[in-house]
Amino acid sequence: MYAIAIIRYRRPFEEIAPVVDAHRAYLRTLQAEGVLLASGPFDPRTGGGLLLRVPDEGTLAALDRIRDGDPFTQQGLAQYELLPWNPVIGTEKLALL
């Protein structure tokens, strides 16, 4: 199962900027675990998006843990919209990531 996470900042970027390094360090741990496939900020800088690979069983609990582990969430700086996603076209290329 895959998921898309849309992160929306709840504060002006000037308040977000000091936490960006911690947020990216957290994302690198998710990438090392094989959970995070891609991530990046939106333009303009109002938040960002994540492409995730999550277990078929316990998907929602896994997504909650991902959201709750993010320093942005822990500091009340951003909110997540978590969308479980079951792609049907391009799955063979996603599997290579």
Image (cartoon, grey):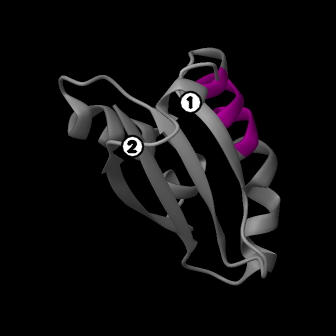
Query: Which residue lies most toward the front here?
Result: 89
Dot 2 and dot 1 residues touching (CB under 8 Å) = yes
Q: Answer whether residue 30 is magenta in the image.
A: yes
* Quadrant of the image occupied by residue 59: top left
Considering the whole magenta stretch, tell me its main secondary structure.
helix
The one nearer the camera, 87 or 71, is 87
Say what secondary structure mark 2 lies in.
loop
User: What residue is drawn where x is 77% and y is 54%?
Assistant: 20
Q: How crowded is mark 1: few (under 14 residues within 10 Å), some or many (20 or more)?
A: few
Residue 52 % position (x, y) = 50, 37
Specify whether 25 is left or right of 61: right
Count of numbered circles in the view:
2
Residue 15 % position (x, y) = 74, 74
In the displayed structure, 36 sits above or below 12; it is above
Q: Answer whether residue 12 is magenta in the image.
A: no
User: What residue is drawn where x is 62% and y is 19%?
Assistant: 96
Specify whether 97 is left or right of 85: right
Q: Which amino acid does label 1 sit on?
A: Leu
Q: How crowded is mark 2: few (under 14 residues within 10 Å), some or many (20 or more)?
A: few
Q: Mark 2 points at which residue?
A: 87
Q: Mark 1 points at which residue?
A: 94
* Quadrant of the image occupied by residue 25: top right
Q: What residue type is labelled 2?
A: Pro
Q: Which quarter of the rendered picture does the C terminus lie within? A: top right
User: What residue is drawn where x is 19% and y is 27%?
Assistant: 58
Residue range (magenta)? 24-31
In the displayed structure, 23 sits above or below 17; it is above
Alpha carbon separation for disc pair 2 and 1: 9 Å
Say what secondary structure mark 1 lies in.
helix
Residue 39 % position (x, y) = 68, 47
User: What residue is drawn where x is 67% and y is 40%?
Assistant: 38
Q: Which quarter of the rendered picture does the N terminus lie within? A: top left
